[in-house]
Amino acid sequence: MGKTGLFDLEKHFAFYGAYHKNPVNVLIHMLFVWPIFFTSLMLFYFTPRFFDCPFQCRLGLVPNFGLLFTLIYAVFYVCLDRKGGSLAAILCLACWVSASLLAKHLEFSLAWKVVLAAQLFCWTGQFIGHGVFEKRAPALLDNLAQAFLMAPYFVFLEALSHFGYEPYPGFHASVKAKVDAEIAEWKENKAKKIS
């Protein structure tokens, strides 16, 4: 059964899903959300370390804001959904390791240019997805923190659902009903503003 409060996966997924109903927009997000996460971790690699650690010298993995950022996402996803969230947490940690290694190899003078180019490309794609296909402003305009925190897990869970994964029986049906209700409310409010 679903959880409540901060870890209410249905609520989070329905909020995000109401802004991502168009299949082309969903596909665009599936392609671009994780690269945004990855390149953000590349940039965080250059933040100061919190403490010295034995693995940082050999591998170049630094306990800094990149690791903190990764752990927040990973723990949140596991709390939302133990099975799917654990897979997403592993993906988050793999992103941190590979982003750190790439950033170390590129060094700051080149890494920030790669990050900037990737971020501009990915964000532009997502705004086109919303403007052209979804015809609705992105979720981040209504709830910045929830949109940023949920985006990677939303597209991950969306991908898992194509393989038949459901966090618990009835999850998708319940979310669909909530998404439909949120979209209907949004359309009603939009119509009131126009008239």
Image: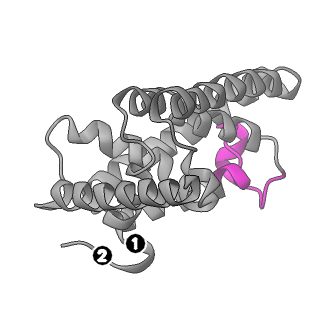
Q: Confirm whether residue 70 shows in the render.
A: no
Residue at position x 79%, y 54% from top? 49
The mark tally for this picture is 2
Image position of 106 with respect to 7: above or below: above
Residue at position x 47%, y 27% from top? 28
Q: Are marks 1 and 2 in contact (CB under 8 Å)?
A: yes
Q: Which mark is residue 3?
A: 2
Q: How far across and how far down the image is residue 117, in percent?
A: 74, 21
For label 1, the crowd category at 10 Å Cα-Cα, with few meaning under 14, some 14 to 19 and many 20 or more, is some
Say which amino acid is labelled 2.
Lys
- Magenta residues span 48-67
Q: Residue furthest bottom?
A: 5
Model colouring:
one colour
Q: Residue furthest front?
A: 195
Residue of label 1 = 7
| Direction from residue 172 to residue 63 in the image, left or right | right
Q: Which mark is residue 134?
A: none
Q: CA distance from mark 1 to mark 2?
A: 6 Å
| Direction from residue 55 to residue 156 in the image, left or right | left
| Label 2 residue SS | loop
Image position of 3 with respect to 116: above or below: below
